[in-house]
Image: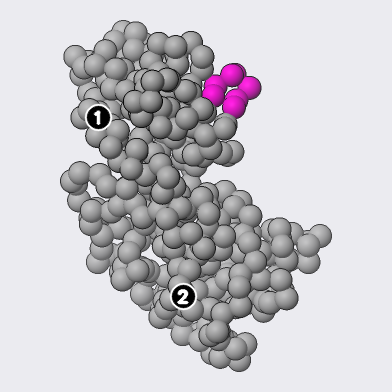
Amino acid sequence: MGDGWTMRKMWVGAGVAVALGMGFVMLLVVGVYLVAGNLAGGAGGGAKRLAKGSVPATYQPIVQKWGNLCPAINPALLAAQLYQESGFNPRARSAAAAQGIAQFIPGTWATHGVDGDGDGDRDVWDPADAIPSAASYDCSLASYVKDVPGDPTENMLASYNAGAYAVIKYQGVPPYKETQNYVRVITTLEKSFAAPTGRVDPSEQAAGAIAYAQKKLGTPYLWGGNGTADQGGRFDCSGLTKAAYESVGIKLPRVANDQYNAGAHPGREELLPGDLVFFSDDLTNSRAIRHVGIYVGGGYMIDAPRPGAVIRFDPIDTPDYFGATRVTEDGAKALPTTV
């Protein structure tokens, strides 16, 4: 969940916050939707690069290298699979005996595990072997269904979930709800691990999310707070952002580092009101994010900073600023419930 936040040297006092609040309301009503119209068209194509810090720095070179193993995959897609499977946890173990960062079951590992780091062994618990093995397995599946009509990546992902035989039989993604959902989830998550190649469409729900957060200004912080009646309507940082977007029909994960994966990542100069902004002591690893707020414009956010403080306006331009996410409904829906 959202961690407490170290006291900033600068923050906006309560009286100033109230005055600023009215200005931000006008900005939201007029500005967000005006910008939404101006930016319609979305990101362009091009080769996928990993978004800043979206993959832990330890694994980023491996994902970048092996994500280009064949045309059916790319680094962002491979990262999305690893996040979906284990949340980048190299010690993950499932009830179905799936093991490691790529969640191979023993039988599949025996056939498709590779010695990715060339040290003479194939270790399912070693990401230097498991990540290359996941890429190699994806490419093997893609080769099995290369003559099937349709999108090669979607056919590969469908093969990963349902088996290559089903994809060949149905000449494309088979009509299985689970398989179709898996393809949708991974291709959607891919966008949150890829660096944008153009402008990112603004969220239509942004103004509503900020309006919700503005109503909570002055509310005392509570560690683990979700704003429920038994908690006195108090929040911590990620509890506030979750509730704000839930008020406009978008359900986010509970913790800040998973909320980072709810959409694409605009640059600092591209921020729009409603973007989630994140902070970390490790600027190379989104899994280390410890604080989140809602950007409102002018270099400020609404956030629940720390124990002893209240929900307020704070500046975002601090040394621990990590990055931002433009939340989308599809992006939020694609996130795993547990990682």
Residue placed at 24% from the left, 16% from the top? 143
Residue placed at 62% from the left, 87% from the top? 14
Q: Is residue 95 magenta?
A: yes
Q: Quadrant of the N terminus?
A: bottom right
Which numbered disc covers residue 69? 1
Q: Secondary structure at mark 2?
A: loop
Towards the viewer: 17 or 22: 17
- For badge 2, the amino acid type reads Thr
The answer to which image quadrant residue 128 occupies is: top left
Q: CA distance from mark 1 to mark 2?
A: 38 Å
- For badge 1, the amino acid type reads Leu
Q: Is residue 316 magenta?
A: no
Q: Which residues are magenta?
A: 93-99
Which numbered disc covers residue 19? none
The answer to which image quadrant residue 147 occupies is: top left
Towards the viewer: 81 or 29: 81
**Position in image of residue 242 (x %, y %):** 58, 57
> Neighbour class for label 2 at 10 Å: few (<14), some, many (≥20)?
few
Q: Quadrant of the C terminus?
A: top right
Q: Which residue is mark 2?
A: 318
